[in-house]
Amino acid sequence: LDGFREAFCQYIAEHFEPSEAEYEMQVDAEVRLADVTHQAVKELDQLGPFGQGNPRPVFAASHVELASPPRTMGEGDRHLDLRVRQHNITMRAIAFGRGEWAEEIAAVNGPIAIGFTAGINRFRGRESVELKLEDWQPEAKG
């Protein structure tokens, strides 16, 4: 099965070029990171179960800065781990399968805008709000 999966993925990568429309992110609301509280995320989870017919809400936040340098994690550094800050609020953001963004984000000199979904990370008996980074872009200077 692994061989088939690998061959299939290689074929798709070689023969299909995704259009820009496939990457266009639909944002449900622009928010401040201060609004993405534990309670707010728990209330959003009440809208689930999430899936193809009921996607998890996507939010955007602007004027976001890096609280620390981006780092990669996981096998082959495939995933991105960020600490982002807006005003006095700092949060963790993860981008699965987007380790290549680390260098690009680190090279930005100024604030970024982010698109994300929000969830609760449960680890070792503790719960914390975690952002799943869907996309980002440098903010225009001016």
Image: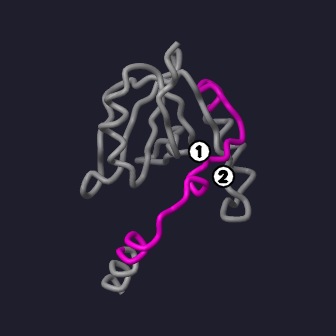
**In the rendering, at what x and y percent does residue 121 appear?**
50, 46
The disc placed on residue 56 is 2
Which of the marked residues, 2 or 1, is nearer the chain's N terminus?
2
104 relative to 90 in the view: left or right: left
Q: How many residues crowd around disc 1 within 10 Å: few (fewer than 14), some, or many (20 or more)?
A: some
**In the rendering, at what x and y percent does residue 34 appear?**
61, 24
**Total labels drawn:** 2
The disc placed on residue 117 is 1
49 relative to 67 in the view: left or right: right
Identify the residue shown where x is 53% and y is 15%: 87
Identify the residue shown where x is 45% and y is 35%: 92
Indicate whether residue 112 is drawn in magenta: no
Residue 31 versus residue 5: which sits nearer the camera? Answer: 5
Indicate whether residue 25 is drawn in magenta: yes
The disc placed on residue 73 is none
In the image, what residue type sits under mark 2? Arg
